[in-house]
Image (spheres, rainbow, N blue to C red):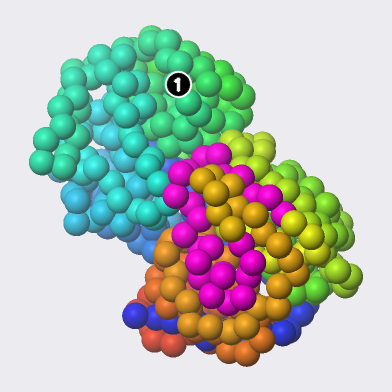
Amino acid sequence: MDKFVIRGGNPLRGTVRISGAKNSALPCMAAALLTDHEIALDNIPHVRDIETEKRLLTSMGAEVRIGTGEASNCTTICCRNLSDPVAQYEIVKTMRASSLVLGPLVARMGLARVAIPGGCAIGGRPIDLHIKGLEKMGATIEQAHGYIEARASKLKGTHLVFDKITVTGTEDLLMAAVLAEGESVMENCAREPEVVDLAALLVAMGAQIEGAGTSTIRVQGVKSLHGAHHRIIPDRIEAGTFLIAGAITCGDLIIAECNPDHIRAVIGKAEEAGARIDVLSAHSVRVQSDGPLRAADISTEEYPGFPTDMQAQYMALATQAEGVSGIKENIFENRFMHVQELVRMGANIRVDGRTATVRGPSRLSAAAVMCSDLRASASLVLAALVADGESILDRVYHMDRGYERIEEKLRNVGAEIERLGNVFAPRPAEARAK
């Protein structure tokens, strides 16, 4: 099992290039199920979740080709000969996003059998909203033996109002609606950039969609979709993570190939905490920090609010800030699993329900710590970068689910970080398409 060994104390200086968004690539790959024509996706990150999605689609009969050389981040998918519309538990048990195949399979094949998914243990992410929406579109849903089975001769357009904002629910039902008969109106939709990116791909495939990126999306169903070529947006969470890395290490870091508009909430809080952030262009930002950091409160919210996927990383920053920072987690009920590991490194953190209180600055010391989920892993990496001594992070396969070669990117800007083991060996960073 791979480990990271990190010696803290080095300010990060240089340029980091951001990979494509894993949380956009996954639904876009699932969208290929909607057509028998080829879908080409550029800027796909090479991370574990993408490998899992490839296995899932291949198990259904899809042809999935991961590019090499100059096309190393281009994936082509052709679902012309789907033979088995089943998302097997052995494949999906490590990835909650596997539920995204439910809507497109029912829409195109009239049948889907999807294992109730797994993934990070950060709290309940039930797919009941997916099920309710598909039932309103005319699907019959049964659940047994850990699987959800959905059947429909032809989905019908309908009016959906989500009980609560759900990103995967919005994406799944959007994909179902594009092949449904008639018009669908979806209200209280997620507004995340990943939803907008999926809609852009679907429109390129011939779908008729209005309102993506707002709370109300209108879809006029079409009979069929065709192939398309689409570029995945930059990963805003990776960009935010490196922004925090630059600030926490008192570094000078340029974050390139990102979208600054997608990380406005993180930029705002980093500035409030004392970092200097300059938006250099539509594709790059610079973070500098040479003075003491200041405490600042955050409260996670749906986009465009402060993202729950950045809460753990911000908590690491708060351990180095002067004063008391309040961190409220409003999205998931069990997303403070990194707290105990940060405390073991010397952080002063108290948790009361969904609120954590961080008193700083704390002098962190190196320790052997355990990664519990994807973003918790990132927070421990950030803490280790400023801790005295050499930290060992175990179970970094969580990190590999969503960050492309993070140890290489950090090492290139001055971090002392080494991977022990070679269980997951993605393509070298220099082989990425320029």
- In the rendered view, would you say 87 is above or below 251? above
- In the rendered view, would you say 190 is above or below 16? above
Of 416 and 42, nearer the camera is 416
Residue 217 at x, y percent in the picture: 53, 20
Q: Quadrant of the C terminus?
A: bottom right
At 31% from the left and 14% from the top, the residue drawn is 136
Q: Is residue 415 left or right of residue 123?
A: right
Q: Residue flagged by tag 1: what amino acid is it?
A: Phe
Q: Which residue is mark 1?
A: 162
Of 55 and 204, nearer the camera is 55
Q: Quadrant of residue 426?
A: bottom left
Q: Is residue 59 left or right of residue 324?
A: left
Residue 95 at x, y percent in the picture: 34, 53
Q: Answer few, some or many: residues within 10 Å of disc 1's Cα (few below 14, many 20 plus, some between 14 and 19).
A: some
Q: Quadrant of residue 364?
A: bottom right
Of 180 and 121, nearer the camera is 121
Please give the range of residues in magenta: 325-349
Residue 114 at x, y percent in the picture: 21, 40
At 35% from the left and 48% from the top, the residue drawn is 96
At 76% from the left and 79% from the top, the residue drawn is 11
Q: Quadrant of the N terminus?
A: bottom left
What residue occupies the far left of the structure in this picture? Answer: 145
> Can I make out residue 322 in this image?
yes
- Report if residue 346 lies within the magenta region: yes
